[in-house]
Image (cartoon, rainbow, N blue to C red):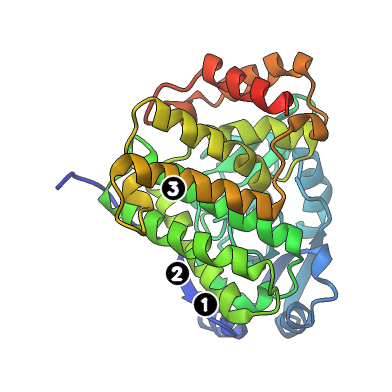
Amino acid sequence: MNIFDFSLKTKVKFGCGVSKYILNILKAESWNHVGLVYDHNLIQNQDVDSLIHSLGKSDRLIKAECTISEPTYDSLDNVRGQFNDPDLQVIIGIGGGSALDMAKAMAVLVHNKKPAIDYRGFDKMTELVLPIIAVPTTAGTGSEVTPNASFIDSQAKKKLGINGEAVRPTYAFLDPELTLSCPKGPTISAGVDSLVHAVEAFAAKKSNRMARFFAKEGFLRVFETLPLLVDDLDNVLLREEVMFGAFLSGIALMHSGTGPAAAMSYPMSVHYHVPHGLGGGIFLPYVIDHNIRAGYTGYADLYNPNKLETNLAQELLLTELRECWEKFQITHNLSKLGVKQADIGFITDETMQLKGALDQNPTPFYEKEIANILNMLTEG
């Protein structure tokens, strides 16, 4: 058996209704001065409104809305003034990946006083970072268990992060009931994001048996359930299955690595405002196809429900994935998103700046391969 490391430092509570136990944690930890970041789209969500109201029973509650789908470092500096209270003890984030990432940033910026962009990278914080409670209302980003938070540098036009163990949530409450108000589009985007996590974590060079176990379980649950869920958004059992699968894929990502599809999504997010999950989804079938043609055979171990021979199993995965993408209306024409042939060079260059992710791909995937896929997709 190969040597590998595994840990899950976030304490996770999963299941319908578990968000009501947040008050128990605040009481057990004696956290009375609470900061809260929540997605502004959730104001009409009765369950979230009830949860926020219950948090108001703390001695002090400071609230801020996350009003931007792709937070920038500048937006963090605009919001941080609301959390200028040295007595804050914990930050709670409620919402999708953007709200959770903003909550992580506020946990850093309460005591680390430099401009937010000074903390981009890994472990740049020098002062106390507050503990974080993550309460996702979408299923797929993995932010509730990862030591990363992504933000856009408006000047450099790049998506970077405030990263390190200090921003890994201490607690995560995964309550499928809180995802019931998530509209069809964000539900698809988050679910597709989790599928990208699973596939790329499974195939990554630094993957291991434990990561592949979680990746496979997560992939199968979401791949089988997400198409059903988009036709039945009020079905809490389907919501629960997708959330659980996405959670497993997030664990896999933590212990393995991402790959080309995720890397190529970053310039799409910054320059063309494509949601991160959909951005990775656009490229995933093409990355899989490239790897199969280049001789990679591992996908047969990820998905082979009919116990087919390796090549047939891999082609089945690709076929069924493309059928799902058609159902989800994921475009295969980047021109519809504003990408021009003249843009291919700079998108390729920006993707190459994430070479660490490209290096994890099981077959060579660099400038030539990126440009080839962009050319195919720009031509429709």
Looking at the image, which is closer to me, 32 or 141? 141
- Which residue is label 2 attached to? 11
Going 84% across and 55% down the picture, which residue do you hit?
A: 67
- Kind of residue at badge 3: Leu
Going 52% across and 72% down the picture, which residue do you hit?
A: 241
Q: Secondary structure at mark 1?
A: loop
- Kind of residue at badge 1: Glu
**Residue 99: percent from left, percent from top:** 71, 57
Compared with 315, 118 (above or below) is above
- Mark 3, mark 1: which one is toward the viewer? 3
Point out the tag, 2 or 3, that comes first from the N-terminus. Answer: 2
**Residue 287: percent from left, percent from top:** 51, 33
> Quarter of the image containing the C terminus?
top right
In 3D space, how far apart are the residues under numbered discs 2 and 3 (Cα atoms)? Answer: 37 Å
Q: Secondary structure at mark 2?
A: strand
**Residue 43: percent from left, percent from top:** 84, 72
- Which residue is label 3 attached to? 316
- Kind of residue at badge 2: Lys
- Which residue is label 1 attached to? 29
